[in-house]
Amino acid sequence: MPYRESFETVAGCKIRIMRGGSGEPLLFLHGARGASAWLPFFETMSERFDLIVPEHPGFGGSDTPDWLDNVGDLAYFYLDLIDTLKLPRLNLAGVSLGGWIAAEIAVRNQSALKTLTLICAAGIHVKGVAKGDIFMWSREDFIRNIFHDPKVAEAMLAQPPGEAELMIEMKNRLATAKLGWQPRLYNPDLVKWLHRITVPTLIVWGDDDKVFPPPYGEAYHRLIPGSRLEVIKDAGHTLQIEKPGELAALMTGFIGSGNGSR
Protein backbone atom coordinates (compact mmCIF):
# COMPACT_ATOMS: atom_id res chain seq x y z
CA MET A 1 0.00 0.00 0.00
CA PRO A 2 1.29 3.53 -0.68
CA TYR A 3 2.66 5.52 2.22
CA ARG A 4 2.93 9.23 2.73
CA GLU A 5 5.69 11.28 4.30
CA SER A 6 5.00 14.26 6.54
CA PHE A 7 6.58 16.34 9.26
CA GLU A 8 5.13 17.04 12.68
CA THR A 9 6.40 19.52 15.25
CA VAL A 10 6.08 18.57 18.92
CA ALA A 11 7.90 20.19 21.86
CA GLY A 12 9.65 22.48 19.39
CA CYS A 13 11.10 19.54 17.47
CA LYS A 14 10.18 18.76 13.85
CA ILE A 15 10.26 15.05 13.04
CA ARG A 16 9.82 13.08 9.83
CA ILE A 17 6.98 10.53 9.78
CA MET A 18 6.14 7.78 7.29
CA ARG A 19 2.52 6.62 7.45
CA GLY A 20 0.52 4.16 5.42
CA GLY A 21 -2.47 1.83 5.51
CA SER A 22 -5.69 1.91 7.47
CA GLY A 23 -7.21 0.21 10.48
CA GLU A 24 -6.09 0.28 14.09
CA PRO A 25 -3.16 2.62 14.67
CA LEU A 26 0.25 0.98 15.10
CA LEU A 27 3.15 3.21 16.12
CA PHE A 28 6.46 1.53 15.26
CA LEU A 29 9.65 2.89 16.86
CA HIS A 30 12.88 2.16 15.00
CA GLY A 31 16.27 1.03 16.26
CA ALA A 32 19.72 2.60 16.09
CA ARG A 33 19.97 2.26 12.29
CA GLY A 34 17.02 4.63 11.84
CA ALA A 35 13.99 4.44 9.56
CA SER A 36 14.83 6.17 6.32
CA ALA A 37 13.05 3.70 4.01
CA TRP A 38 9.63 2.04 3.83
CA LEU A 39 10.59 -1.61 4.37
CA PRO A 40 8.74 -4.63 2.99
CA PHE A 41 7.82 -5.37 6.64
CA PHE A 42 6.15 -1.95 6.85
CA GLU A 43 4.29 -2.66 3.63
CA THR A 44 2.96 -5.91 5.07
CA MET A 45 1.88 -4.32 8.35
CA SER A 46 0.18 -1.43 6.55
CA GLU A 47 -2.17 -3.95 4.93
CA ARG A 48 -3.72 -4.48 8.38
CA PHE A 49 -2.97 -1.32 10.31
CA ASP A 50 -2.65 2.44 10.12
CA LEU A 51 1.13 2.17 10.42
CA ILE A 52 3.01 5.21 11.73
CA VAL A 53 6.83 5.15 11.58
CA PRO A 54 8.49 8.31 12.92
CA GLU A 55 12.19 9.07 12.92
CA HIS A 56 13.22 9.82 16.48
CA PRO A 57 14.42 13.31 17.39
CA GLY A 58 18.13 13.35 16.61
CA PHE A 59 17.84 10.76 13.82
CA GLY A 60 17.57 10.88 10.03
CA GLY A 61 15.36 13.65 8.70
CA SER A 62 14.23 14.79 12.15
CA ASP A 63 15.59 17.72 14.13
CA THR A 64 18.06 17.33 16.98
CA PRO A 65 16.52 19.35 19.82
CA ASP A 66 18.50 20.96 22.63
CA TRP A 67 16.42 19.11 25.22
CA LEU A 68 17.41 15.62 24.03
CA ASP A 69 19.62 14.06 26.72
CA ASN A 70 18.32 10.54 27.35
CA VAL A 71 15.75 7.92 26.41
CA GLY A 72 13.37 9.25 29.03
CA ASP A 73 13.20 12.48 27.04
CA LEU A 74 12.12 10.48 23.97
CA ALA A 75 9.48 8.66 26.01
CA TYR A 76 7.88 11.95 27.06
CA PHE A 77 8.21 13.28 23.51
CA TYR A 78 6.29 10.32 22.13
CA LEU A 79 3.61 10.66 24.79
CA ASP A 80 3.14 14.22 23.52
CA LEU A 81 3.14 12.99 19.90
CA ILE A 82 0.45 10.41 20.72
CA ASP A 83 -1.68 13.23 22.14
CA THR A 84 -0.97 15.47 19.15
CA LEU A 85 -1.91 12.80 16.61
CA LYS A 86 -4.96 11.82 18.70
CA LEU A 87 -4.17 8.10 18.79
CA PRO A 88 -6.42 6.42 21.39
CA ARG A 89 -6.22 2.62 21.75
CA LEU A 90 -2.81 2.62 20.15
CA ASN A 91 -0.75 -0.48 19.39
CA LEU A 92 2.84 0.45 20.27
CA ALA A 93 5.86 -1.50 19.00
CA GLY A 94 9.59 -0.90 19.05
CA VAL A 95 12.73 -2.69 17.95
CA SER A 96 16.07 -2.50 19.78
CA LEU A 97 16.50 1.15 20.81
CA GLY A 98 12.87 1.69 19.81
CA GLY A 99 11.84 -1.17 22.11
CA TRP A 100 13.63 0.54 24.98
CA ILE A 101 11.76 3.76 24.22
CA ALA A 102 8.46 1.86 24.03
CA ALA A 103 9.07 0.27 27.44
CA GLU A 104 9.90 3.67 28.94
CA ILE A 105 6.67 5.07 27.48
CA ALA A 106 4.61 2.23 28.95
CA VAL A 107 5.96 2.52 32.48
CA ARG A 108 5.15 6.24 32.46
CA ASN A 109 1.67 6.31 30.93
CA GLN A 110 -0.13 3.46 29.18
CA SER A 111 -3.59 5.04 29.16
CA ALA A 112 -3.55 5.39 25.34
CA LEU A 113 -2.09 1.92 24.71
CA LYS A 114 -4.00 -1.15 23.58
CA THR A 115 -0.97 -3.45 23.18
CA LEU A 116 2.81 -3.28 23.48
CA THR A 117 5.33 -5.23 21.39
CA LEU A 118 9.03 -5.25 22.29
CA ILE A 119 11.35 -6.65 19.60
CA CYS A 120 14.95 -7.44 20.62
CA ALA A 121 14.66 -4.47 22.95
CA ALA A 122 17.49 -2.59 24.61
CA GLY A 123 16.89 -0.94 27.99
CA ILE A 124 17.82 -3.51 30.63
CA HIS A 125 20.96 -5.28 31.81
CA VAL A 126 21.18 -9.01 32.55
CA LYS A 127 24.01 -9.80 34.93
CA GLY A 128 26.49 -12.25 33.46
CA VAL A 129 25.14 -12.01 29.91
CA ALA A 130 27.33 -9.83 27.72
CA LYS A 131 25.76 -7.52 25.15
CA GLY A 132 27.32 -6.83 21.78
CA ASP A 133 29.16 -3.52 22.01
CA ILE A 134 27.77 -1.79 18.92
CA PHE A 135 29.87 1.31 19.56
CA MET A 136 33.09 -0.65 19.19
CA TRP A 137 32.09 -2.42 15.98
CA SER A 138 33.05 -1.12 12.55
CA ARG A 139 30.23 -0.53 10.08
CA GLU A 140 30.98 -3.89 8.46
CA ASP A 141 31.09 -5.73 11.79
CA PHE A 142 27.85 -4.09 12.84
CA ILE A 143 26.00 -5.23 9.74
CA ARG A 144 27.39 -8.76 9.98
CA ASN A 145 26.51 -9.03 13.67
CA ILE A 146 22.87 -7.93 13.43
CA PHE A 147 21.90 -10.83 11.18
CA HIS A 148 21.91 -14.61 11.61
CA ASP A 149 22.18 -15.34 7.89
CA PRO A 150 25.53 -14.12 6.54
CA LYS A 151 24.04 -13.91 3.05
CA VAL A 152 21.71 -11.11 4.19
CA ALA A 153 24.63 -9.17 5.66
CA GLU A 154 26.84 -9.66 2.62
CA ALA A 155 24.05 -8.53 0.30
CA MET A 156 23.70 -5.34 2.32
CA LEU A 157 27.46 -4.76 2.36
CA ALA A 158 27.60 -5.28 -1.41
CA GLN A 159 25.58 -2.07 -1.85
CA PRO A 160 27.89 0.72 -0.64
CA PRO A 161 26.01 3.75 0.72
CA GLY A 162 26.14 7.12 -0.99
CA GLU A 163 27.38 10.27 0.68
CA ALA A 164 23.92 11.34 1.88
CA GLU A 165 23.26 7.90 3.34
CA LEU A 166 26.62 7.91 5.12
CA MET A 167 25.78 11.29 6.65
CA ILE A 168 22.49 9.91 7.98
CA GLU A 169 24.28 6.84 9.36
CA MET A 170 26.74 9.11 11.16
CA LYS A 171 23.93 11.25 12.57
CA ASN A 172 22.13 8.13 13.81
CA ARG A 173 25.27 6.71 15.40
CA LEU A 174 25.95 9.98 17.21
CA ALA A 175 22.39 10.12 18.53
CA THR A 176 22.55 6.49 19.66
CA ALA A 177 25.84 7.14 21.46
CA LYS A 178 24.35 10.15 23.22
CA LEU A 179 21.41 8.06 24.42
CA GLY A 180 23.16 4.81 25.24
CA TRP A 181 26.89 5.25 25.72
CA GLN A 182 26.98 5.05 29.51
CA PRO A 183 25.62 2.83 30.88
CA ARG A 184 25.70 0.77 27.71
CA LEU A 185 22.22 0.77 26.16
CA TYR A 186 20.19 0.43 29.34
CA ASN A 187 18.55 2.39 32.13
CA PRO A 188 19.38 0.95 35.58
CA ASP A 189 16.04 2.21 36.89
CA LEU A 190 13.81 0.68 34.21
CA VAL A 191 13.77 -2.82 35.73
CA LYS A 192 12.23 -1.39 38.90
CA TRP A 193 9.14 -0.18 37.05
CA LEU A 194 8.42 -2.74 34.32
CA HIS A 195 5.85 -4.33 36.67
CA ARG A 196 3.70 -1.24 36.04
CA ILE A 197 3.01 -2.42 32.48
CA THR A 198 -0.45 -3.98 32.47
CA VAL A 199 -1.40 -3.80 28.78
CA PRO A 200 -1.07 -7.03 26.78
CA THR A 201 2.63 -7.30 25.91
CA LEU A 202 4.37 -9.38 23.26
CA ILE A 203 8.13 -9.87 23.43
CA VAL A 204 9.84 -11.15 20.26
CA TRP A 205 13.48 -12.20 20.03
CA GLY A 206 15.86 -13.84 17.59
CA ASP A 207 17.53 -17.01 18.83
CA ASP A 208 20.88 -15.78 17.46
CA ASP A 209 20.70 -12.15 18.56
CA LYS A 210 24.33 -11.09 19.02
CA VAL A 211 23.46 -7.59 20.29
CA PHE A 212 21.09 -8.61 23.09
CA PRO A 213 21.23 -12.41 23.45
CA PRO A 214 17.98 -14.32 24.18
CA PRO A 215 18.33 -14.11 28.00
CA TYR A 216 17.46 -10.42 27.63
CA GLY A 217 14.12 -11.38 26.12
CA GLU A 218 13.57 -13.89 28.93
CA ALA A 219 14.32 -11.15 31.47
CA TYR A 220 11.79 -8.77 29.92
CA HIS A 221 9.28 -11.64 29.98
CA ARG A 222 9.85 -12.20 33.72
CA LEU A 223 9.70 -8.50 34.54
CA ILE A 224 6.47 -7.66 32.68
CA PRO A 225 3.57 -9.51 34.32
CA GLY A 226 1.54 -11.67 31.95
CA SER A 227 3.72 -10.94 28.94
CA ARG A 228 4.14 -13.42 26.09
CA LEU A 229 7.59 -14.36 24.75
CA GLU A 230 8.17 -15.64 21.22
CA VAL A 231 11.65 -16.63 19.97
CA ILE A 232 12.16 -16.83 16.21
CA LYS A 233 14.58 -19.52 15.05
CA ASP A 234 17.57 -18.81 12.82
CA ALA A 235 17.20 -15.07 13.40
CA GLY A 236 19.46 -12.30 14.56
CA HIS A 237 18.80 -8.84 15.94
CA THR A 238 17.05 -7.20 13.00
CA LEU A 239 13.90 -9.27 12.67
CA GLN A 240 12.00 -6.70 10.60
CA ILE A 241 14.56 -7.23 7.81
CA GLU A 242 15.67 -10.84 8.27
CA LYS A 243 12.34 -12.40 9.28
CA PRO A 244 9.65 -9.91 8.19
CA GLY A 245 6.97 -12.51 7.47
CA GLU A 246 7.31 -14.32 10.79
CA LEU A 247 7.45 -11.07 12.75
CA ALA A 248 4.41 -9.68 10.94
CA ALA A 249 2.45 -12.89 11.56
CA LEU A 250 3.25 -12.86 15.28
CA MET A 251 2.32 -9.21 15.67
CA THR A 252 -0.89 -9.30 13.67
CA GLY A 253 -2.04 -12.46 15.45
CA PHE A 254 -1.23 -10.99 18.85
CA ILE A 255 -2.92 -7.65 18.21
CA GLY A 256 -5.88 -9.28 16.51
CA SER A 257 -6.48 -11.63 19.42
CA GLY A 258 -8.14 -8.79 21.28
CA ASN A 259 -6.49 -9.40 24.62
CA GLY A 260 -3.04 -10.48 23.47
CA SER A 261 -3.72 -14.05 24.69
CA ARG A 262 -2.66 -13.13 28.20
Image (cartoon, helix red, strand yellow):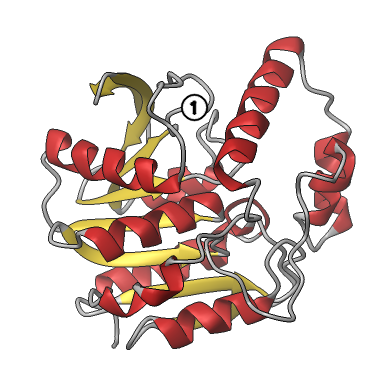
Relative side of 52 to 122, left or right? left
Percent across and percent down for residue 198 are: 23, 77
Badge 1: residue crowd in 10 Å (few <14, some 14–19, many ≥20): many
Q: Nearer the viewer, residue 127 or 139?
A: 127
- Which residue is at a point 29% across and 69% down the rendered structure image? 255
Percent across and percent down for residue 214 are: 66, 78
Q: Is residue 46 visible?
A: no
- Which residue is at a point 83% across and 37% down the rendered structure image? 139
- Which residue is at a point 77% across and 65% down the rendered structure image? 210
Q: Say how many tags the image has.
A: 1
Q: What amino acid is found at the position of numbered circle 1 in the picture?
A: Gly
Q: Is residue 176 visible?
A: yes
Which residue is under mark 1? 58
Q: Secondary structure at mark 1?
A: loop
Relative side of 167 to 3, left or right? right
- Which residue is at a point 43% across and 67% down the rendered structure image? 190
The image quadrant that residue 206 belongs to is bottom right
Quadrant location of the C terminus?
A: bottom left
Quadrant location of the N terminus?
A: top left
